[in-house]
Image (spheres, rainbow, N blue to C red):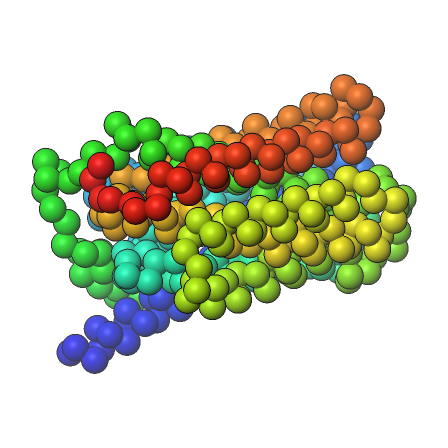
Amino acid sequence: MQTRAASRDKLLIVLLHAVFFVSGIATVLIGQVLPYVSARFHLDDLQLGYLFPAQFAGSLTGTLMTNWLGRQGRLIPATAAGGLLMAVGIAMLNLGSYELALAAFLVNGLGIGLTLPAINVLILERDPARSGSALNFLNFFWGLGAIVSKPLTDFTAQGSSLFITTLCLSIPLVLLSLAIIILPTPSEARIQPKSRTSEALPPIWSNPLAWAIALFGFIHVGFESGIGGWLTTYTERVEGPAETRLITPTFLFFLFFIIGRGIAPAFFRYLDENKVIFISLLVILSGLALILTASGSFQLGIGGALCGLGTSSVFPTNISRFSKAFGSEAMRRATPLFLCGTLGATAVTWLIGFISQRFGDLRSGMYVLALSIMLLIVLQMVLAFHLKSPKKGV
């Protein structure tokens, strides 16, 4: 009986990582299909920019729902429901108007908001002692999905039609979600550590340190979504229309993004979370300088690779230090942390489109990313000073 339960538990973990992989494709798909949606509905940059708030509004709602479901011990059903909603939202991209495209990204975002926080919490609670490595390994699979998104779109999109692209994503999402629903899984009470009563739990959101970590997440997730969402369109503006090819700046961004997440666990043997994040921010800054001054594909590619490598481990490492500062039980009360990330993604991606439309130049909008990194470096210095000796329940 014990062996059978352990086998089911391992199968569940495999399914969670598989869902995380496909969720990576679904999350960054918006940036890869922007040129197709723009051509199909004849949109300007400001109209394209509204697609991002639509997806992130759904993600925000899904995150709030995940918080409630987590308190009910139903994060596994939340993951399955999120996968089905992503499948529906992606399939809706085949509908025939700009307004329905907005609705499609809203539904896709709702599924993302249900799925990603739920899986992060489930994995973290299984291995709180090695949270940094476990979360980086999990998010390695998200990166695998992200890197597949660009070539998948390039090789399956036909003209302005995304039918085959959406089919390739919707079917796996439905199958994985059904597998999670059908699989007899252990209760979450067996997965998560035994919790103290709510009265005994240390305060979190009355502590300015928690909000500083959340603010860091707001800016960084905004940067990550901004560059992931706009780099494909920015590349076309710099290079001009080009034939479909595999090696693009966007592909290199996600390739080195996944390489970074693959090698990140090794760095935690020698460096703590704050040192890893600070080094990562400096790598991002160097890559972004190349992107913003680029005049051709070679410079864009090098810049994209450096930005991908630098940003790869920042998100999971920021979650890890939050957990270490306030205890593993804090992750079930970390909704503001995830919400801040979603709000940051909404703000930065929209602001890039707004400034681009205002000045008639997407490069001007991309300078929002430079401001984001400079703010992160300053904030990281402050956080590193206060997190030298993190204490639970401050």
The residue drawn where x is 56% and y is 32% is 375
The residue drawn where x is 20% and y is 34% is 203
Front residue (pair 275, 257): 275
Q: Position of residue 382 (x, y in %)?
A: 44, 35
Residue 15 visible:
no
Quadrant where the image shows the C terminus: top left
Q: Position of residue 112 (x, y in %)?
A: 47, 45
The residue drawn where x is 60% and y is 38% is 373
The residue drawn where x is 70% and y is 40% is 230
Front residue (pair 327, 18): 327
Give residue 257's quadrant in the image. bottom right
From this view, report whether residue 14 is shown above or below residue 334: below
Left or right placement of residue 186 versus residue 244 in this view: left
Left or right placement of residue 339 versus residue 140 in this view: left
Q: Position of residue 224 (x, y in %)?
A: 58, 43
Residue 303 visible:
yes
Quadrant where the image shows the N terminus: bottom left
Q: Residue furthest top?
A: 358
- In this rendering, the count of numbered labels is 0
Q: Position of residue 92 (x, y in %)?
A: 59, 42
Left or right placement of residue 342 versus residue 236 in this view: left
From this view, report whether residue 4 is shown above or below residue 333: below
Front residue (pair 317, 97): 317
